[in-house]
Amino acid sequence: MIRIAAQPTSTVPVWHAGFMAILPTIHSYARGAFAHLNPEARQDMIAEVIANALVAYVRLYQQGRVSLAYPTVLARYGVAQARDGRRVGAKLNIKDPLSRYCQKRKGVVVERLDHALHLHQ
């Protein structure tokens, strides 16, 4: 017997379109805030700002307060969180030298080995 496969259902959340509408403003704000960083670090920080803004936006949506989700406010919040080393989905770990939180609080400097080796040759 031949069975016809069911059509896949859409799994796009209801809040998705609203966040996508404000994403360019958030991205632009984050790019300006971290323009002084090297390209690799800048991209990491921009991604972190977007992740923070997304989490805040979804939380506002869940509370029924999505009308308060202004893109520049979410971007400013995300930038502040990223600068403070607060990453989405990660605990603050002062003992982890790779943690931005530890680096900022204890003054730890982490460099790429391939860059350090080229400098000493």
Image (cartoon, rainbow, N blue to C red):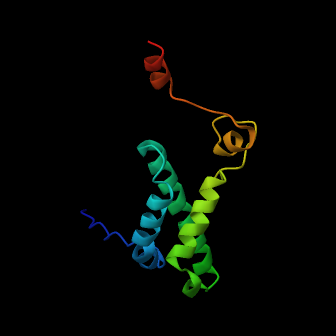
- The residue sitting at 68% across, 34% down in the picture is 108
**How far from the left and from the top, in percent, is residue 97?**
68, 34
- The residue sitting at 41% across, 45% down in the picture is 39
**How far from the left and from the top, in percent, is residue 34?**
49, 54
Q: Is residue 110 above or below residue 100?
A: above
- The residue closer to the viewer here, 59 or 83, is 83
Q: Residue most toward the top? A: 121
**Rendering quarter of residue 52:** bottom right
Q: Is residue 9 left or right of residue 5?
A: right
**How far from the left and from the top, in percent, is residue 105?**
74, 43
- The residue sitting at 52% across, 52% down in the picture is 45
**Rendering quarter of residue 73:** bottom right
Q: Residue most toward the front? A: 36
Q: Is residue 110 left or right of residue 46?
A: right
Q: Is residue 115 above or below residue 96?
A: above
Q: Quadrant of the C terminus?
A: top left
| Whether residue 29 can be seen here | yes
Q: Residue most toward the left? A: 2
Q: Is residue 12 above or below residue 79?
A: below
Q: Is residue 38 above or below residue 111?
A: below
**Rendering quarter of residue 111:** top right
**How far from the left and from the top, in percent, is residue 59?**
62, 74
Q: Quadrant of the N terminus?
A: bottom left
How many discs appear?
0
- The residue closer to the viewer here, 106 or 99, is 106
| Whether residue 55 can be seen here | no
